[in-house]
């Protein structure tokens, strides 16, 4: 059996602080073998930087997936293109820098296990992209030549699109877990074909906010329509994610454990 911890969108420094404190503990308490985190908001709420990426790796995260905020820090393009542990949404237009998927090796009791990671982006209420369904199919077929363990982060707004992808990939991948809304759903389950599914893993960041940003700023924007500088909120920080327990031979999910942990600074 293999345990993969997946962490929902890490939002700015408050989210990173929670990750730094909680991930090493979770690894030992829950016997976690591999950690994937959505990092599209990890640098000040928008994108990722080299320093922030190094911070996440120091917190024992093995692989970072992204989303619509991937290019928010312009200097990160080189990092995203060259760093094998950062996975971009695979259905972005051809020619976009970055890795459309990753295959990672871990050692478990002296046996090498390979884990495939795919990141996709939705098209409902989001910018136009290539088809996430057909892209997932193509990449999953490619990864399956190497391993049956394939984890999919579906970064999308619409529940229906995420759920449809979960059913579409049921039996073909290990798990489909959603990100992007920053609000955790309580619908974690194993689908008929053995694919773990959860509509949204949630956010690791401030809950006294509007999806991670200071609530006053967002309320003012809704009231007046005038854009203001977004600032990451800092109060009531939660760690959101899911642990996926997998049969490493078949690549099927056995169970999912949803995590919503209130972060208390130690
Ligand atoms: Fe996000
Ligand atoms: Fe997003």
Image (cartoon, rainbow, N blue to C red):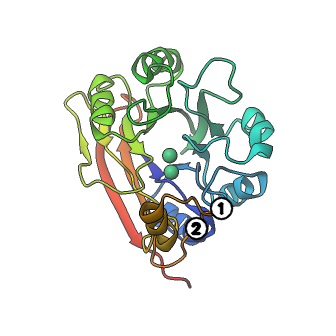
Q: Is residue 37 shown left or right of residue 157?
A: right
Q: Which disc is residue 231 wearing?
A: none
**Mark 2 or mark 1: whose residue is earlier in sequence:** 1
Q: Nearer the viewer, residue 85 or 168?
A: 168
Q: Nearer the viewer, residue 139 or 40?
A: 40
Residue 258 quadrant: bottom left
Q: Which disc is residue 232 wearing?
A: 2
Contact check, label 2 and label 1, Cβ < 8 Å: yes
- Name the residue located 24 percent from the left edge and 39 percent from the top edge: 190
Residue at disc 1, CB closer than 8 Å to ligand 1: no
- Name the residue located 49 percent from the left edge and 79 percent from the top edge: 235
Quadrant where the image shows the C terminus: bottom right
Q: Residue furthest bottom?
A: 266
Residue 175's place in the image compared with 90, above or below, is: below
Q: Is residue 82 shown left or right of residue 232?
A: right
SS state under label 1? loop
Residue on which the image places disc 1: 44
SS state under label 2? loop
Q: Residues within 10 Å of mark 1 (few under 14, many from 20)?
A: many
In the rendered image, residue 161, in percent from the top left (x then y), is placed at: 32, 32
**Residue 205 visible to the viewer:** no
- Name the residue located 58 percent from the left edge and 48 percent from the top edge: 40
Q: Is residue 256 shown left or right of residue 146?
A: left
């Amino acid at each position: 059996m293999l345990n993969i911890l997946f962490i929902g969108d890490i939002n700015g420094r408050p989210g990173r602080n929670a990750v730094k404190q909680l991930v090493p503990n979770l690894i030992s308490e829950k016997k976690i073998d591999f950690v994937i985190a959505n990092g599209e908001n990890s640098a000040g709420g928008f994108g990722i930087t080299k320093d922030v990426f190094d911070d996440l790796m120091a917190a024992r995260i093995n692989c970072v997936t992204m989303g619509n905020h991937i290019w928010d820090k312009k200097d990160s393009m080189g990092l995203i293109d060259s760093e094998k542990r950062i996975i971009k949404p695979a259905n972005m237009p051809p020619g976009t820098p970055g890795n459309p998927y990753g295959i990672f090796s871990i050692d478990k009791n002296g046996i090498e296990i390979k884990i495939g990671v795919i990141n996709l982006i939705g098209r409902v209420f989001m910018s136009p992209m290539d088809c996430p369904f057909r892209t997932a199919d193509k990449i999953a077929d490619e990864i399956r030549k190497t391993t049956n363990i394939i984890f999919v982060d579906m970064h999308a707004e619409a529940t229906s699109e995420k759920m449809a992808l979960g059913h579409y990939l049921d039996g073909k991948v290990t798990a489909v877990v959603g990100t992007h809304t920053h609000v955790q759903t309580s619908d974690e389950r194993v689908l008929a074909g053995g694919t773990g599914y959860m509509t949204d893993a949630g956010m690791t960041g401030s809950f006294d906010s509007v999806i991670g940003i200071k609530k006053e700023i967002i309320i003012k924007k809704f009231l007046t329509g005038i854009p203001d500088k977004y600032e990451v909120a800092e109060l009531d920080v939660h760690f959101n994610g899911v642990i996926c327990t997998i049969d490493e031979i078949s690549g099927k999910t056995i169970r999912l454990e949803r995590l919503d942990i209130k972060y208390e600074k130690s």
